[in-house]
Image: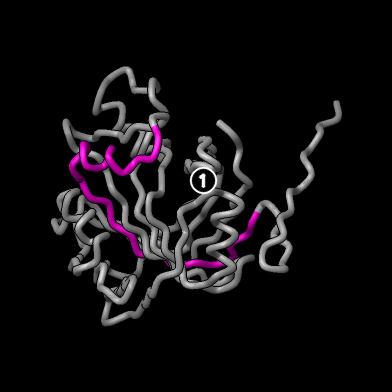
Amino acid sequence: MTIQTAEPRAYEIEGQTVTMPLVVGRADIGLATYLVNASAARDLLPGPELDVVELLPGRAMLTISCVDYIENDLGQYNEISLSFFVRERGQNPAIPYVGSFADLVRGRLPTYIYRLPVTTTLSREAGCQIWGFPKVLNEIRFRTKGDRYQCAWDADGKKVFRFSVRRGGDRTMPDSELTTYSYIDGVLHSTRFVQGVDQMGMRLGGAKIELGDHPIADELRALGLPKGALMSMWLGRMHGTFDGPEKV
């Protein structure tokens, strides 16, 4: 039997050819997940096709990820992702809350990214034109102080937040497949990506966040931040691939 494979998709972005799958050779990521107000989270979804996953009654999960792309087909840049764990409507687990927790532990929950600032125009244009991600240019600075990985995010001349997690870890995470959703011209699409990690650390709590005076900081306040994180992670030397988007 002959297996037919799809031809790689190529896009012209700012005079550069970007071919799928996009390859990430190395990225370092500090992230934390918070239990937040589910109603406020739903208000940030742009369409009716998705709903936030509630881990507890009235509590959705927000993840803040600060990503230093070191080796990447789109070059080196900084990125911050604000995302919710979501499901397509009608795909609720048979056992509420318990089923969602089991899917979370198994890495089966998709995400929807509602904020995605970056520091280069190539990354912004590729993210918007190829995947429909809400990428914008903002000021993002990373530094390591002691064992803390610190992130400073400013937009429109105002402070959004200062965020940090503990750096380092000695676990490995084998390549695993994940899914994220986006909207392209108002139509829901899914993107498959695969990632593995060479230096992973995971902790209960462990994140620190200080909100500023930008309207995005007020969005985070409406969700219930600042508060303690449910968990935080360090993903050092992450590698992966991103496929092109597929219409749902």
Work out which residue is located at the far right of the displayed protein and give it: 2
Q: Is residue 37 magenta?
A: yes
Say which of 158 and 221 sits in front.
158
Q: Is residue 42 left or right of residue 48?
A: left
Report whether 207 appears left or right of 66: left
- Picture quadrant of residue 153: bottom left
Tell me: 126 left or right of 109.
right
Which residue bears the numbered disc 1? 176
Give residue 85's position: percent from left, percent from top. Answer: 35, 41
Position in image of residue 217 (x %, y %) = 22, 61
Q: Amino acid at mark 1?
A: Ser
Which quadrant of the rendered structure holds the N terminus?
A: top right
Q: Position of residue 240 (x, y in %)?
A: 56, 56
Viewer-nearest residue: 53 or 203: 53
Tell me the colour scheme of the image. Answer: one colour
Q: Main secondary structure of the magenta part?
A: strand
- Closer to the camera in the image, 163 or 187: 187
The correct choice, above or below, for 24 with respect to 183 in the image is below
Extreme residue toward the top, this view: 94
Residue 194 location, x and y as percent? 55, 49
| Magenta residues (range) | 22-47
- The answer to whether residue 103 shows anywhere in this view is yes
